[in-house]
Image (tube, rainbow, N blue to C red):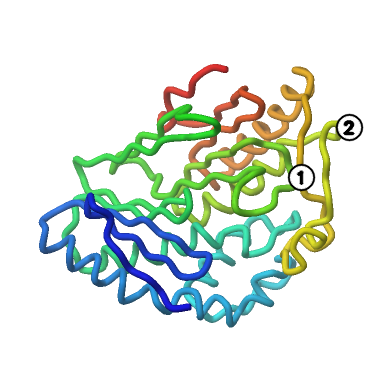
Amino acid sequence: MSAIAARFPDGRLHLQHGPIDLIIEAFGAATEVERAYAQAIDRFGDILPTLVRELPTLRRSVGDAYPLLQGPVARRMAEAVWPHRAVYITPMAAVAGAVADEMLQALVCGRALDKAYVNDGGDIAVHLTPGHELRAGIFASALDGVARLTHDQPVRGIATSGRGGRSFSLGIADSATVLAATAAAADAAATLIANAVNLDHPAIERRPARALDPDSDLGDLPVTVAIGPLPDDAVILALDRGAAEARRLRLSGAIEGAALSLCGQWRIDSHACLEKVRSA
């Protein structure tokens, strides 16, 4: 299957190749926007084939040895997960964010754009110039909040993880949205925070990841497949554990903020970037 490029009626660029599905929007002079889109299209065709060549290494846990990877997206993935190597994590935890970062770089290179973003299934890389801002919605079951990004903030990446997304989760979070310096860094951290929203309870059903997908990078680790009704105290405990992980990552400088949800309840650990998260 070859890469596909198309335009939405509102002018946004849509790029799709296998599991990679991007929505791209750039703002600025029309000629600059069109040149930026052409650059993105030109770069996109090589992204998936290059990743596929290194999949065996990308699916291995990051341990004491830094992964030997050649492709630029693969290297971004490894860089994003390397600080978290004390726990089980593979470069695949940052794949969507790393693709978004790489495509944003291709989009803006040499172009005079006011702002731009690359959205890879909800993991978003952002470009901002002085005087411009971007607002991104935070969704669990509805529009629950807004991340307001400005040029003077260090945030250039947003990512969301949790059960029910495109990847398996070890935890039970409905969502964990993270703001960080890059989309890849946000992607890796969102995985860890979503995993930390967790507890043992008879209402939680888990199965080995390999039983659901033989190629899963999580191997035989138990991933969440269903959650029944949980008492309020269990929800609070699970969210508190996720919030503690978010705070640890923020204080270490790995992220700028996070918003996590479970069963209609929320926790926020952030500077001024996240706002208007609604109550249950």
- What residue sits 65% from the left and 29% below the top? 262
Name the amino acid type tagged 1.
Thr
Residue 187 in the image: state x and y as whole percent: 55, 52
The quadrant where residue 37 appears: bottom left
Mark closest to the chain's N terminus, 2 or 1:
2
The answer to whether residue 96 is left or right of residue 272 is right
Q: Residue at x 64, y 71 (%)?
A: 58
Q: Quadrant of the C terminus?
A: top right
Report the residue at 84% width, 31% height from top. 203
**Residue furthest right as drawn:** 202
Q: Which residue is mark 1?
A: 224
Q: Is residue 229 above or below residue 21?
A: above
On the image, the x and y values in percent for residue 22 come to 41, 59
Could you tell me residue 79's position as x and y percent? 56, 64
- Crowd around label 1: few <14 · some 14–19 · many ≥20 (10 Å): many
Which residue: 45% across, 61% down?
21
The amino acid type found where label 2 is placed reads Pro
Label 1: state its secondary structure: strand
**Left or right: 108 as drawn, with respect to 64:** left
Q: Which residue is mark 2?
A: 202
